[in-house]
Image (tube, rainbow, N blue to C red):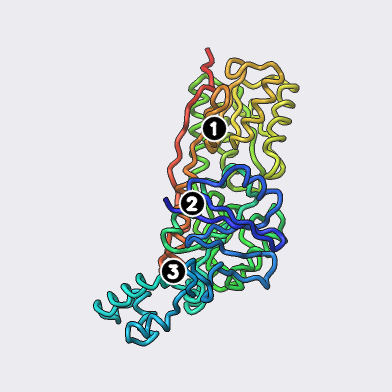
Amino acid sequence: MNKFNVAVISDCSVFGKSQSHKGIPKLLLRELARSSTLHAIGWNGHPAILDPLNERNMPTLSIDDTTEWPTGRRRPRMAEIARIAGVDISTVSRALAGSPRVTKETRALIDQIVRDTGYVVNEKARALRDGRANQVLVIVSDIATPFYPEVVQGIVEALAQRGINVLLGATLRQAKREAKLGKQLLTGVVDGIITITGSVPKPILNMQGFNRKVVAISRPVPHEGVTCVTIDNYAAAKEVMVHLYAMGHRRIVHIGGPNLSETYRDRRAAYVDFMRDNCLAELTKVRSTDTFNEDAESGFKIMKSMLDEGPRPTAVFCATDELAISAMAAARQANQNIPGDVSFFGFDDLKLAGLMSPPLSTVSVPRFEMGRRGAEVLFGQIYKGTTASTKIVLEHRLVLRDSVAQIR
């Protein structure tokens, strides 16, 4: 099984942990959320050491040409491989890079010497020669947000197969932090950026061809030419409304996310349009959170106020599973039976949704596939010169569980 090292950077201190690519432990995520600004997931067995908020720090690897091996012997250098093979250093370099200019016989000889001597290619030096960092920065708003881990896993898995490191930076929803993270592209620390925040760091907007070095995932960014991998949020939300209507619900309310997000605006628009088109405009009721980091508290508060105001809804369509789960808690506190008195429908299909009592009906968003496709697009644009569509729409699906009841 492939292993990825995780390096947590906080005030120039580095903590390493070997971790399977299947996921990052929740305890580590919580610690990252509290104390770190960026961590790196290395593909080659060595943690990439980087502090994005200190521009003097450049990526380093934990091995260099003076490393002592367990046998007590110094690691062989390329010059020694060339001397043993009886060729120039440039020939060894081309052979290890897979150049067709090296004959099969010479390449076979060099490969055998490399195996016999235990020579390891210095990827750091190669990257410097190529003028590339072979690293990509993923920008998220909050590293503890449950939507992100599967997206990041998809990114890491796709890029690890291609020899590219992944750095993960959290803006904590601060423009200053986002700007400093973005400067890593300008200084050459990274070759490209994947953003899951719905925005692009301002310092890179004047960079020539920046739109080919940036890919957005889930939330589109307001910049022409930047590819976004997402789902059709309007269509997904409309399907939710069709289902609730078919189950007999008419007093349906919507608890939405911040209006600043195109994603949440599309979900809200589908709700409003459906209510209007089905002669239910007078029953339309939308309450939205003000910021992106208060889903747990806001869902509870909004639901409580709706129950206090009356008339009480028979169904609640929430823009995220987090909002739905917290709204369900408010309903239980008010002695409302779920789904007997009030039904709930979420969005995202977080793992916790299926563990609720009753299990939460929701919209499944292909988070891992989003990450994988986004990484492939960015890799192609940066390293292969390919061009992708500016919007890649993946399929969603409704997951019908027990949180929605039929109205008799």
Instruction: Give the label on residue 274, or none.
Output: 1
As drawn, the label of residue 293 is none
Q: Amino acid at mark 1?
A: Phe
What residue do we see at 35% from left, 70% from top? 115
Q: In the drawing, does residue 154 fall left or right of residue 272?
A: left
CA distance separating discs 1 and 2: 31 Å
Element carrying mark 3:
helix
The residue singled out by tag 3 in the image is: 383
Amino acid type at image mark 3: Tyr
**Disc 2/disc 3 C-alpha distance (Å):** 18 Å
**Amino acid bearing label 2:** Gly
The quarter of the displayed image where residue 263 is located: top right
Q: Are marks 3 and 1 in contact (CB under 8 Å)?
A: no
Q: Dot 2, crowdedness within 10 Å: few (<14), some or many (≥20)?
A: many
Rendered location of residue 190, percent (x, y):
56, 67
Residue corresponding to mark 2: 371
- Do the residues under discs 1 and 2 have CB atoms within 8 angstroms? no
Pick whichever of labels 3 and 1 is earlier in the sequence: 1
Q: Is residue 389 visible?
A: no
Q: Check if mark 2's residue and mark 3's residue have beta carbons within 8 Å.
A: no
Marks 3/1: CA–CA distance = 44 Å
Q: Disc 3 or disc 1, which is closer to the eye?
A: 3
- Rate crowding at label 1 as few (under 14), some (14 to 19) or many (20 or more) other CA atoms within 10 Å: many
Q: Residue at x 49, y 41 (%)?
A: 365
Q: Position of residue 271 (x, y in %)?
A: 57, 34
SS at badge 1: helix
